[in-house]
Image: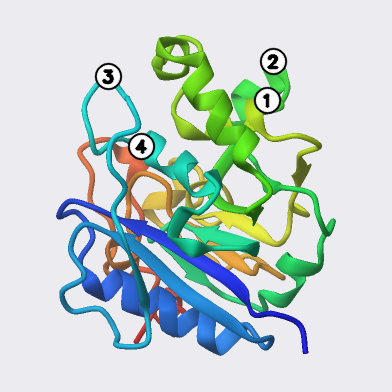
Amino acid sequence: MSEPVNVLCLKWGTRYGANYVNILHRSVRRHLRRPHRFHCCTDDPAGLDEDIRVIPFPENPGIQRGWPDILAKVLPTRDGFGGLRGPTLFLDLDVAVMGGLDELFDHEPGRPCMIHNWVAWRKAVIGGRPPAGNSSVYRFEAGASNYVFEKLLAEGPRAEDQSVFNGDQEFLTYAFRDLAWWPEEWVRSFKFHCRPVFPLNLLTTPKPPARCRVLVFHGRPDPDEAIAGFWHKKLHRRARPAPWIAEHWQL
């Protein structure tokens, strides 16, 4: 029998509580058939499901702009991180698992995989879609990706310079070797693929995307806000209640 694969999330601070981790953990359990281990790297394990394996939040590897920092999402590529080895799927906490995850381990085996990051249609029309990744859902080989962590250390202040790399995902896009994108339909954005464009967002309920495996709520709204309806001072960012999300984002 093959070794279990890994699913990993990261939680620090107070924006996302233990319920976000537990919902993700149970969603993965429902949608991943093969043997797996679920890990949470966190500074506060209180309230987590008992069968979640806790990895202590890493010490600062030398980031100058303060710690914790979003570049912590690069650290799982370090050899020995949490004792992980083998195929590892990283999931942000603000996602809803909507379909089978086994294919995310079968796609382009051995290669790192990321979301080809989305841009507003106006930007895509003007400048095209740049070759930048989104790290909300990415897969890598734990124990065989230390070159990414070494590049973080070698780049020093340049890796932290947001005029060069807009956060962890642009750095990961740059550092991963032989990077592959997920098929477009598998990983979708609530903002770009569910919420109608303005002014229809004020009148029309967001719709679930077809054949989606993981729905990403990058920025706002978070999943619970999208379920209830999202009120924002900017009209184009509002969303009517989407109760169908609760079918997927639940304990």
For label 1, count other residues whose C-alpha is less than 10 Å away and answer few (under 14), some (14-19) or many (20+). few
- For numbered disc 1, what is the local secondary structure? helix
Residue for badge 4: 70
Point out the image quarter for the C terminus: bottom left
Real-space Cα distance between discs 4 and 3? 12 Å
Residue 139 appears at what percent x and percent y?
64, 55
Q: Which mark is residue 127?
A: 2
In this view of the protein, can residue 205 be seen by the observer? no
Instruction: Return the residue nearer the eye: 56 or 25.
Output: 56
> In the image, what residue type sits under mark 2?
Gly
Instruction: Return the residue nearer the eye: 236 or 31.
Output: 31
Residue for badge 3: 64
Q: Quick check: 162 above or below 43?
A: above
Real-space Cα distance between discs 2 and 1? 5 Å
Nearer-N-terminus badge (3/2): 3
Residue for badge 1: 124
Q: Residue at x 64, y 69 (%)?
A: 213
Mark 4 or 3, which is nearer the eye? 3
Residue 24 appears at what percent x and percent y?
42, 74
Q: Residue at x 41, y 15 (%)?
A: 162
Real-space Cα distance between discs 4 and 1? 26 Å
Query: CB of mark 2 within 8 Å of CB of mark 1?
Result: yes
Nearer-N-terminus badge (4/3): 3
> In the image, what residue type sits under mark 1?
Ala
